[in-house]
Amino acid sequence: MSRTRFVNTKKRNDNKLHYQSLIIPNFEERNDDIIINVNDYTRLDVLAQELFNDAKLWWILSAYNNLEGDSLFPTGKTTLRIPFDVNIIYDKIKEVN
């Protein structure tokens, strides 16, 4: 599922759509998280393909681990938390947006 699904839009006076910023909340550690070791060469899209069978879900790994920016690399991290259930992320993003 694309993260743009959560972006709200409003129609402007000139009938063009205005896209609001998407707020990605911080996610707390959970007892059911899966922990994996990574290095600076681990790509989140490759990892998402292995874990979720969809490389486009790399943003879930980034959001869940509170990584900054829009990079496919978890620079500076040695471990990543993998959500047991991705619906946790969807629900929390819907809640804050």
Image (cartoon, grey):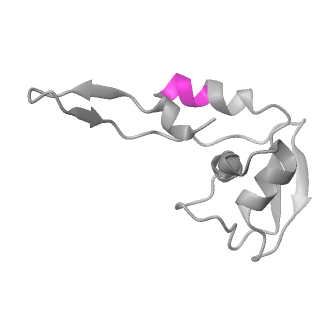
The vertical placement of 39 against 60, above or below, is: below
- Work out whether residue 64 can be spotted: no
Q: Which residue: 38% across, 28% down?
A: 8
Image location of residue 96, percent across then percent down: 49, 28
Q: Is residue 56 left or right of residue 4?
A: right
The vertical placement of 74 against 57, above or below, is: below
Q: Is residue 19 left or right of residue 7?
A: left
Q: Which residue: 61% across, 28% down?
A: 92
The vertical placement of 83 against 44, above or below, is: above
Q: Which residues are magenta?
A: 92-96
- Helix, strand or loop: magenta stretch: helix
- Work out whether residue 31 can be spotted: yes
Q: Which residue: 70% across, 66% down?
A: 74
- Between 56 and 34, the residue placed more toward the observer is 56
Image location of residue 28, percent across then percent down: 71, 40
- Asked if residue 32 is among those painted magenta in the image, a careful observer would answer no
Image location of residue 63, percent across then percent down: 63, 47
The mark total stands at: 0
- Picture quadrant where residue 75 is located: bottom right
Quadrant in which the N terminus appears: top right
The vertical placement of 36 against 42, above or below, is: above
Q: Is residue 14 left or right of residue 36?
A: left
Image location of residue 94, percent across then percent down: 54, 25
- Picture quadrant where residue 90 is located: top right
Q: Is residue 58 left or right of residue 70?
A: right
Q: Which residue: 43% across, 33% down?
A: 7
